[in-house]
Image (cartoon, rainbow, N blue to C red):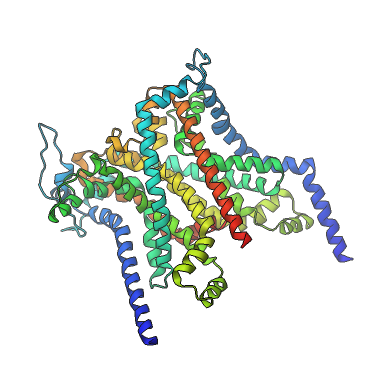
Amino acid sequence: MKKRSERKKLCIRICLTVIAVVTALIFIMPIVLTISNSFMSAAEITSNYGSIFQKTDTGGKQYISQTVNLKFIPDMVTFSQYATVLFKSPDYLLKFWNSVILVVPIVVFQLVVAVLAAYGFTRTRGKLSAIVFFAYVILMMMPYQVTLVPNYLVLNWMKLLDTNWSIWLPGIFSPFSVYLITKYMRRIPVPLIEAAKIDGANEFQVFTKICIPICKGVITTCAILVFMDYWNMVEQPLLFFNDTDKYPLSIFLSKINAQEVGLAFAVATFYMIPSLLIFLYGEDQLVEGIAYQGGVKG
Amino acid sequence: MRRSKKKDFSKVIKKQNKSWFHRLVSGAFLAPSVLGVLLFFVLPFLVVIYFSFVNNPVAKKFVGLTNYINVIQNGAFRTAVGNTLFFSVVAVPLAVILGMALAFLLDAGIPLKSELRSCFLTPLMVPTASIVLIWQVLFDYNGVVNVAVQKFGGGQVDWLKSSAGLLVIILLFLWKNLGYNMILFLSAMGNIPKDIIEVAELDGANRWQIFLHVKLRYLSPTIMFVTILSMINSFKVFREIYLLTGEYPYGALYMLQHYMNNTFASADYQKLSTAAIYMSFVMIVIMGILFWVEHHFGKDLEEE
């Protein structure tokens, strides 16, 4: 009897494992495909996906080939696409650089502003600070569709539209990191801070020597999440930039035309690299930070 | 003696904390953020409210609710709201339920747990723009999915240019967000007290009862949090739609952000402001309901 139920348990366990593994493979399949296809030659890509991308709109649809060929492994691994992206068509590198120049200052300064503000919220627990914090929470929950309108009005008034400042400034003051870091910092026991003060530390020393080191983890998590959010950005440049030369690669990538489809996979992979590296390096931190976020109520 | 001294000190500190000097210092830490938020979000939002009540930004004639009536009668706005709501209503519960299912799956004592977790989380860390190509290859009219459909005797479906597009976008949304939700649920599940489950088992509760009456109860704050988070994310799905189908998508994929973009393009400030206020109003109502429900559930849990 006991043996039977154990066998049943084992069976269920195997089934669950299979389900989990298959689902996981489905999850990473698109990423693996993009990366592996970036090593194909232009000719191979056009012959594989010709029926999708090579639409010549001269009197009806004409495709290079009729079939779609989804391949995981290239016939011949080549770096020629990357060579083209890196050395022959400066456009992509330029757009990549646009992305970097837009995102990095936002991540750095949003965190600086947020850590300072979090400390302010930690040290004031009065009614006023509670109201202000609640306003931050509401603001954080507002979708882009709402916040972009006031952003636009101010930027227009300041004559900053079409400059990088139009992306930087609203990004730097976005309340997301303030919320998360405050939630964490407020859990530092007050006696610890008081003890430091008794020992003669001033406010700034408490901030740099106690609060920042304790919050290192959550700051890292914030940095990753903010980076990802802005590395993905589409809405802001679309609205605030007239000059398409300023577009980050995230928008430009979707505008790659049919002639350059061979390159597209290489550019896409290239754009993935920074975020994948960050993931590789900071996964545990990220998981811990996300988990913490759920541990405290909304 | 020593104890009272300590108490004195903390009294001094507490007094110090109430002093104007302390407030000034804390205020200085808050200042950059508060000023930035005021300048870029709060004050202009007041202007947005103002614009929604005037006929145009130049003449500034008060017109009451005319803008509100005009916008709500606008066909494009209605389509956009309808599509966005429909998407959220379908995608958010799926994101919550499937996220929880994944968490339970990984928590069922299977091997390779951390590797699997990484797989589910990777989509979060891949830029949408990078992955769009593969979605095109899969869901194009001549794409891989249609080839498969035909093999099984079905007809070709124009995934991205028909109502089926919503299905594709929901899939993309889930693909991207399930990992995040799963992590949130996994951590909450780790916090369920083991002894309560043991007691329930001793009392003869079966698995289903334990799930329903113990686990689900303890997960309810997380469920609420994931719901709010997924809802915020569901409004960001414009990115996927834009990158996949361009500026003029099929009607069923026309979202609020498309409407906003078009209104931006025509620089119609009153319309834009009014639409933004409608949206923030709806968001506040939804949040209010969710917070109320959470509060209600939370109390329920404490009383038992």
Tell me what residue is drawn at x 48 percent, y 25 percent: A156
**Residue A69 shows in this picture:** no
Q: How far across and down, in percent of the image, does residue B265 sit?
A: 37, 25
Instruction: Single out the residue that lies furthest toward the right.
Output: B1
Tell me what residue is drawn at x 26 percent, y 44 percent: B164
Tell me what residue is drawn at x 39 percent, y 72 percent: B110
Q: How far across and down, in percent of the image, does residue B264 sit?
A: 40, 26
Q: How far across and down, in percent of the image, does residue B89 sit?
A: 40, 45
Which quarter of the picture shows residue A36?
A: bottom left
Q: Quick check: A69 left or right of A230?
A: left
Say above or below: B139 vs B198. above
Q: Quick check: B226 left or right of A54?
A: right
Q: Quick check: A178 left or right of B229?
A: right
Instruction: Single out the residue that lies furthest toward the front.
Output: B204
Tell me what residue is drawn at x 14 percent, y 56 percent: B152
**Residue B214 shows in this picture:** yes
Check the picture and name the quadrant holding the N terminus of chain A.
Answer: bottom left
Q: How far across and down, in percent of the image, does residue A139 sit?
A: 54, 39
Say above or below: A122 vs A239. below
Question: A208 or A87: which is nearer to us?
Answer: A208
Q: Quick check: B184 left or right of B165?
A: right
Question: A165 or B225: which is nearer to us?
Answer: B225
Question: B4 or B106: which is nearer to us?
Answer: B106
